[in-house]
Image (tube, rainbow, N blue to C red):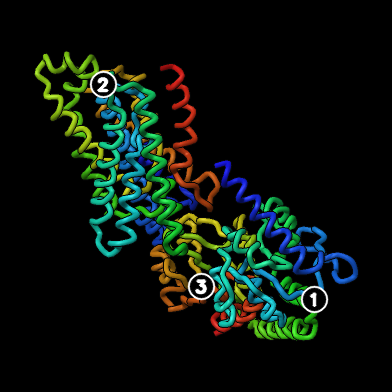
Amino acid sequence: MKGSVVLALLVCGALLSACETQRPVPDGPVSGIFKDDLGREVRIPVPLNRVISLAPSITEMAFAAGAGDRLIGVTSYCNFPAEAEKIQKVGDTLTPNIESIVALRPQLVLVSTASQLEAFASLLERQQISVYVLDVKKVDDVPDRLRRLGRIFWTNEPAEEAAKNFELRQKAVESKIAQAERPKVFLQISNEPLFTIGNESFMTELVERAGGISLTKDISGGYPKISKETALAMDPDVIILSDSEDNREPNIVFNNSKAVKNGRVYKIDADILSRPGPRLADALEQISGHLNK
Amino acid sequence: MTLAAATLLGSERVSIFEMTEQGRAILFDIRLPRVLLGACVGASLAVAGASLQALLRNPLAEPYLLGVSNGAALGTLLAFVFLDGIGWARPLLAFAGAIIATFAVYQMARSRAGMNVERLVLSGVIVTTFLSSIIVLLTSLLDAARLRGYTFWLLGDLSQATYDGFYMTLAAATIGTIVLSSQARALNLMMVGERDAFDFGVELGRVRIIIFGMASVLVGTAVAASGSVGYVGLIVPHLVRLAVGSDNRLVVPMSAIAGAIFVVLADTVARTAIAPRELPVGAITALIGAPLFIYLLRRN
C-alpha cells in the first residue's frame, strides 16, 4: 500500500516536471482569458494545438469551427465526423479516464457537464491543464458557441461561416412553417419505460421551432418518465422516435392514436437529435420535413 | 375495495358513467392490469417474507434485504441480455437466481451456535452487494441505450404491466399462498424451537426445502414482472402480526391480502403524486420500509 502511494507520487512528479520542461507555463501575453458557461475565468494558451473534448457535441462543434485537427483526445461516443473516430479515446463524458487525459499532455480540456467539475478541474489545473465548460442549452447557443470556439482556437473565419450557415438553415426552417394548424407532437425517447422530453430539453424547442407543438412541453424536467394514461389521452398527431435500439416502435398505448392510424410516426437518428451541436440544424430540417407534409 | 378505488385513481380522469373509447382503453388496457399485477406482486412478496421470517425465526428476514430479490433481478437481466426472445426465460432465470441467493445466504448465516439476527442480516448485505456489483458490471459493459429501461425497472416499477405478467404472478401467488399456508402448523412449531418441532414429528428438512423453494418462486415471478419492490415482505407481515398475533396459520394468508393492498396503495401514490410524471413504486415502499427496519432492529 505504502509502496504504491510512493510510486504514484513519483509518477505524478515525473509528469509534472515533464509538463514544465516541454512547454511554457500558459501565462503572460501568449494566452487569453475566456469566461466559460459556468462563469469561470479560464486562461487558455496560444497557440492552442493539444485539446481534448469530453462530449460528442463538443467534438462536432470543434470540427465545425475548423479546429478538428487540434483535438488529440475524444470520448468513446465521438463518432462524427468520420475523422473523430481516429482520434484517441479517453473514456466517456461521465467517466473520463483522468490518467489517459494527463498522459496526452493537453493544453485544454473542453467539457459539457459540471458533475464533480470542481475536483476534476483542480486536479487537471495542478497539471497545468485548463478546463473549459461549454454548455449548450438552447438552439441559439449553437452559433454563439461556434463563434466562441473560433476565438479560442483562432479559427474565426471557418467558425463564423459555420455559425452563419447554422443560422441560415434555422431561418429557412422557420420560414417554412405552414400557416395552418400546428401538429401536436409526442417525442418518444424510450419505449419501455416510456420516457419523453420535458420543458428543460432543447428538443422541446426543436419541435416548436420546426412548426409543431410539443405535447409534453409543460412537464418539468429534461427527460421525464411519463404516465401511460396521460400519453394515451394526449392522442398525438405526430410521433417522433429518437432512433436507438430500445426505441424502434411507438409505445403500445399509441396504437389508436391519430399518429399511428395516419402513419405519421417518424424516426430521427438519436445522435443527430440528442447532441446539442451543429447537427441540430439537420434535426430541425428533418423534423420540419415530417411536420410540414 | 382498495383495488376498485385504485382503479378509479390515476393521472387522467376517467368517468365510469360516460365511458369513451379512450377512457375504456386507459381503464382496461393500462390501469387495471397494473393494479392487478401490483396486487399479485404485493401478495407474493408479503407471503414470501412472512414464511421466511417464521422459518428463520427472524423478523428481519425479507426477500429484498436477504439478496433474494437481487438474485432474481440478476437472473432477469441475464435472460434479458442473452435470451430476450424467449418469454418464459425471465421468470425461470429469476427463480434460479432467487433460489441460489437464498441458499447462499442461508449457508453463510448458519453457524454451530445457530443463526443469530446480525449474522443473517450481514450475510444478506454481502450477497446483495455482491449481486449488485455483478449487475453494475453487466450494465456498464453492455450497450447503455438498451439497458436504460432495465436500470429504472431495477428500482421496482409496475408501469410495464401486461395481462400476461398478471396471469403468471396470479398463478404463482395463489399456489404459493396455499402451499405456504399448509406449512403454517409446522412453522408455528419451529418458531418454538427446531428440536421441539422435531419431537412433534415435523420433517425439518422437507419444510425448509418447501419454504425456500416456494419463496423463491414467489420472489422470482414478482421480480421478473416488476423489478425489486423492496421492504414489502418486511412491512406487511409485521403489521399483520400486530393485528392477528403470531399464529402463522393466520399470518401467512393474511399477509397475502395485506400485501396486495399495500403495494396497490403504494403504486397509486407512485402513479399520482407527481402526475403526469411517475415515480418507481419501489421508492415509495422503501421510504416506508427503511425506518421500520431500523425500528425492528433496535427493538430486537
Q: Chain of mark 3?
A: A
* Residue B16 screen position, x and y as percent: 40, 50
Give left or right: position of A23 versus A74.
right
Q: Which residue is mark 2?
A: B112
Q: Are marks 2 and 3 on the same chain?
A: no
Q: Is residue B71 visible?
A: yes
- Where A134 falls versus B281 (above or below)? below
Which mark is on residue A240? 3
Q: Nearer the viewer, residue A66 or B50?
A: A66
The Cα–Cα distance between marks 2 and 3, rounded to whole angstroms, is 63 Å
Q: Is residue A116 left or right of residue B225?
A: right
Using the image, tell me which numbered label, if any, was put on residue A47: 1
What's the residue type where badge 1 is placed? Pro
Residue at x 53% of width, y 62% of height: A196
Vertical order, A80 against B156 (above or below): below
Question: At 36% across and 40% down in the image, what residue appears?
Answer: B3
Label 3: state its secondary structure. strand
Q: Nearer the viewer, residue B26 or B198?
A: B198
- Cα distance in 3D space between marks 3 and 1: 44 Å
Q: Residue furthest right?
A: A29
Residue A171 in view: no
Q: Amino acid at mark 2?
A: Arg
Residue A198, position in %: x, y?
Answer: 59, 60
Q: Residues within 10 Å of mark 1 (few under 14, many from 20)?
A: few
Label 2 resides on the chain identified as B
Chain name for mark 1: A
Question: Which amino acid does the dot numbered 3 rest on?
Answer: Ile
Between B90 and A293, the one lying in front of the other is: B90
